[in-house]
Amino acid sequence: MKKRVLTVLLSAVMALTMTGCGGTKTDESGKSSDSKENSSAISGQSTEKVTKGKAPKGAKTIEVWSEDRHDLDYIESMIDNYNKTNEDGIFINLTIISDDYENMVKLAIDSGTAPDIVGANAFPLFKFIDNDLFVPLNDYIDADQEYQKVNEPYEHSYEGANAHDGKIYHVYSGMRSGVRVEYNKDLLAKDGYDEIPAKLSDYIDMAKDVTEKGNGDVYGIGFTSASPFERLLEMSAQVSGIYYYDYTKGKFDFSGYKEILEQGKRFMTENIAYPDQQGVDNMRALFAQGKFALWSNASQEAGVFTQQIPIDKFEWGVAQVPSLTGEIKGALQTTPSKSYAILSSSKQKDLAWKVISYFQSEEFTKGYLEKGYCLPITDYMDGIIDKSKTGRLADFSMLDYESVYPTVPNVNLTGDDYRTVLWNAVMGYVEIDDAIKDLNTRYNEALDADVKAGNSKRLVISDYDPMHPDKGTVSYKEK
């Protein structure tokens, strides 16, 4: 019997990357985005036709668009094999859209040039289904027992992300882990540490000790200039039971971050952190060179530190992010990904489903996971892949308290977003109390205005549990 759609998901707003399933931004991917030079500009955007050959006579071409470039070698080889061997008379034509993907898809729909299938990893669901742009997949799923076995679609249907009101619009094949601490084992051991503290204050003390003993040559920790708050402190807040949206009341509330920010300021006021915040890849390279001992990011780092910027000067480990008290009081955010939707404008929906069922078949998914592009999202695939082939990705396996988070209402915000403001508070550019007051005011005023205008709905979960945010019963309020 199918499980009812009761779970919810935080929309993927970050570009997902090498071992994290998805994304095209160079500073986040496991490979740079210049691997192929067959690109052209359409409306000022970069597009790339990657399918080999031409459709044979009589074949039906299914157009597929994706923003994912990091996994292109594998995807291209599997499409090439399918185009040569399938008996359904289908030719898959894949196009990579490197920039402004969502708007490019919308423009194509408006102009009548849309593909049949789009990679739907990070699309805001309501923007598409409110305008009937995605096809519900339930009938196709229910008629395909093999697909259900491999993908467990009803177990991974997230209200507001890939499903709404019992209808599933796309199904996830993989998972990116939540943030972990990557650390230089040699540096820490030299200074007398053999494990990562579970308590944030102890973690900061350790980083300070490493910096002081480094005498200006080595630092305890490094932060990137690219959304630094979310790569450690925001996730420490999550596992401390702190979140920026109060699901039971249906409003934003940043008040819980005060102690996290006070602790985080120590990195700056006590001169603990590496004294420069550069782009992600630059900071990764500095970590790989041994310039600082602690770094934090999600499962994409498995591929980065073995392929893109390989660490060969020291042994590196992976640990859990610290919490305020050393106890776990909330779930760590993880992000499902690698999904495909059929556009309602497609004239070949049944054939498009055949392509999706191939992309998410056991053979296709097994190879994808064993290449280390993603962590498995389903129990079935987790049980059949050869994890010895995934390399360091195994160090980022799901924790018991990792979960998806409810999709926070989208608001038309004026001014800096919360991650920018909270990091400015860490840096000392704004007082903590002023930052929290500003965010509470601006976010809730924006939410109230958008709900009143009908541009958004107030999400409420009366039985919300911070340890199991994906298990709550969702309702939407229109005021």
Image (cartoon, rainbow, N blue to C red):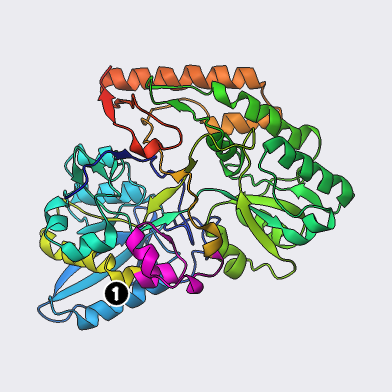
Residue 99 in the image: state x and y as whole percent.
Answer: 41, 53
> Is residue 449 one of those drawn in magenta?
no
User: Residue at position x 37%, y 56% from top?
Assistant: 377
Q: Name the residue nearer the viewer: 161 or 5.
A: 5
Q: In which quarter of the image is residue 379?
A: bottom left
Residue 298 in the figure: left or right of residue 310: left
User: Residue at position x 75%, y 55% from top?
Assistant: 194
Residue 174 in the figure: left or right of residue 234: left
Q: Name the residue nearer the viewer: 140 or 135.
A: 140
Which quarter shows the C terminus? top left
Residue 42 in the image: state x and y as whole percent.
Answer: 34, 57
Mark 1 neighbour class, 10 Å CA radius: few under 14, some 14 to 19, many 20 or more: many
Instruction: Give SS at disc 1.
Output: helix
Q: Is residue 9 above or below residue 381?
A: above
Residue 103 in the image: state x and y as whole percent.
Answer: 32, 46
Q: Could you tell me if residue 37 is visible in this image?
A: no
Q: In this view, does 213 lie above or below 98?
A: above
> Is residue 385 one of those drawn in magenta?
yes
Residue 19 in the image: state x and y as whole percent.
Answer: 48, 61
Report the magenta residues as a range.
Answer: 366-392
User: Residue at position x 74%, y 62% from top?
Assistant: 289
Indicate the amino acid at tag 1. Answer: Ile
Which residue is the site of mark 1?
Answer: 79
User: Residue at position x 80%, y 57% from top?
Assistant: 189
Q: In which quarter of the image is residue 150?
A: bottom left
